[in-house]
Amino acid sequence: MEMFSEVLELFLSLDNFIAIALGVVIGVVVGSIPGLTATMAVALALPFTFSMQPVAAILLLVGIYKGGMYGGSITAILIRTPGSPASACTLLDGYPMAQQGHAKKALKTALYSSVIADFISNIALIFFAAYLAKIALNFGAPEFFWLICFSLTIIISLASGSMIKGLLAALMGILLSLVGLDEVYGSQRLTFGNYSLMDSISFIPLLIGLFAIPEIIEFYRKKALPHIKAKASGVGMTLAELKRCLKSIIRGSLIGVVIGAIPGTGATAAAFISYSDARRRSPNRDNFGKGEVEGVAAAEAGNNGVAGATLIPLLSLGIPGDVITAIILGAFMVHGLTPGPIMFQENLTLIYALFVGIMFSSLVLLVVGSGAIKYFSLIADIPKSILFPIVLMFCVYGAYAVNNDTFDVWLMLGFGVLGYIFNRAAIPAAPFLIGFILGPMFEDNLRRSLLIGHNDLSIFVRGPITWFFIAITVGSILLAIYRFVSARRQLRRDTTQEAS
Amino acid sequence: MSTSSPRRIRAVRDTGDVLAGCVLMTASAILLFYLVPNYISEPPILQNPMMSPRWLPRIVGGLMLGFSFLLIVQGLLVDNTGKDDGRRIERGTRLRFAMMVVALAVYVVLFEALGAVIAGILATLILFAAHPVRIWWVYSLAFVFPAAVAFIFVKVMNVPLPLMPF
């Protein structure tokens, strides 16, 4: 009871409500602007949270994440431009619906499915995060070492294209995370005598540089394209249609929860799996791809079912499952908090306050989404030529604000150029960021294990938990190799067929 | 007698991958053989080589070297150029790109000298002109946004920024 009142005391603050509402609004608005992503919005919002209370700061970022997940579907439906890769599946039926004059119905379907899936995902988060954290309390440094090894191998799945490029990106991320003073011996590592680098590379300039600047560079490098007008017309979703889609929504949400809880799998996979499952089971399967309301519902449910579940490994184990949770992990660190099982022991009130806020964010998403549907076409109409100069300004202000040092602005631009080169060379940026975050954790747990075991390597195989993680790490590597080989075989088959 | 085969073997299937692999291979060789020995100092007494500050950078460098070699091999054997992976773009005018570079330079060079507001206004005006934005009232946003955002940072969020040069 005492805990309950403490949680309420921590959560029931005007700042938290404003943070959630503002976060969802920003997320939906940014998500509904073609070319701007939820990742970019979360990265740009991070410097604003410096002076905020930890709960409000995290809720603001979570709000942007959730709003952005839904917002991404708006442009997919209205102008056939998915705001995020996960919304690409919504486009399959959403855009045909918009073309048939049912844009509003598609938007409402996407909203209701997103809210239901988000709610289910949040419940899963509340139930499983605490349970997993309880198990993780038995982990020592060797167990965490193998868990991080497992997470690093899963990075391969974050590489949407080439596995080799994904691994190279992750290695570069790990390497850059090692710049600075060595924590055990205090010796300088690749600082080249620069004082600004001694405290390691700042996370925020890296983040902003990697995810916002390349978009800006690409926009000014590309030929200016004509602006596509969006229109949200037609009637909304009926109760009968909602009832018809409910099974697909719940199934999609559960698919999203399972996929979201596995680090590295992502919302895109969840959306497509949910969509194909709904297509397989639906009596209207022939209408899928031609403007089927159930198709939009299933895709959005899968996509948003991931949102809460990705926070499960983050909060319980301290392992980010995707780019946005990696940024949220950075926000925790900025506020002196380290997510993981220890946080469940030391800051349980804060965690429960976050849970209440996250649940509340689903409701806010419903209200914001319903109220603003008619304005979405106006938002989607804002041209990039006006937006990107303003985004760049946010980038520079945000990077400078970290240490009040122009060096961070240089650093941000450097990472921006690197991100642009990554784009041009089709090297994924997500593994780079995850590598940057997991690198120090990997080294720290390795060294702690060696110290605990008095340099005896048998500590790394000390019990069933370490063996379990070794097995899933090896399994993950073998699976990645199998997928790589079969993708190559498929490519070869396709090439042979084309040639013949 | 020679016959021309329709399935000619090309030496390089994906120039981009080979180039990226070569650059990364050079970078990882420099890291492994020059930067790690010269720019990471090692304590005189080490109980275990795995505890050394050089250990992980060396492993990462070695892996990078290996994987960049594999990337070169991939570029030589597999053609990924047909994939829609964002590598192909239709380029705009050079002036547009150059103006963006100038705007970036304004931020990094003049941010502290002129302050966040004036540097922001200048860079935003340059970027509006670079596109170019043809709606005259939009240019007023270049004055409103830098001032408003700087105000939010400094006064509302208590995040310090150099506001003005005076």
Image: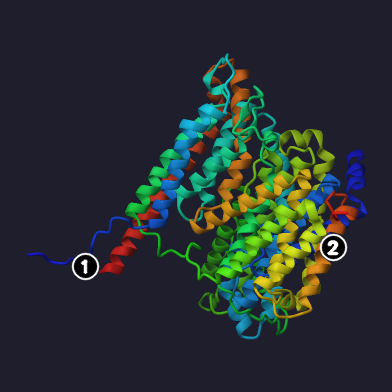
Residue that appears at 40% across and 59% down: B80
Amino acid marked by disc 1: Pro
Q: Can you tell which mark lies on residue B147?
A: 2
- Give the chain letter at badge 1: B
Residue that appears at 51% across and 77% down: A286
- Residue A43 makes an appearance in the image: no
Give neighbour class at mark 2: few <14, some 14-19, many 20+ (Cα, 10 Å). some
Q: How is the image coloured?
A: rainbow
Observer-nearest residue: A431 or A384?
A384
Quarter of the rendering containing residue A454: top right
- Residue A3 makes an appearance in the image: yes
Amino acid marked by disc 2: Ala
Q: Secondary structure at mark 1?
A: loop
- Does label 2 or label 1 sit earlier along the sequence? 1
Give the distance between the C-alpha atoms of the residues marked 2 and 1, in whole angstroms: 64 Å
Above or below residue A3? Residue B41 is above
Left or right, A8 with reference to A236: right
Give residue A255's position: percent from left, percent from top.
Answer: 60, 57
Return the residue at label 1: B6
Above or below residue A19? Residue B94 is below
Quarter of the rendering containing residue A301: bottom right
Above or below residue A91? Residue A212 is above
Q: Quadrant of the N terminus of chain A?
A: top right
Contact between labelled residues 1 and 2, with CB atoms less than 8 Å apart? no
Point out the residue furthest to the left here: B1
Give residue A201's position: percent from left, percent from top.
Answer: 66, 40
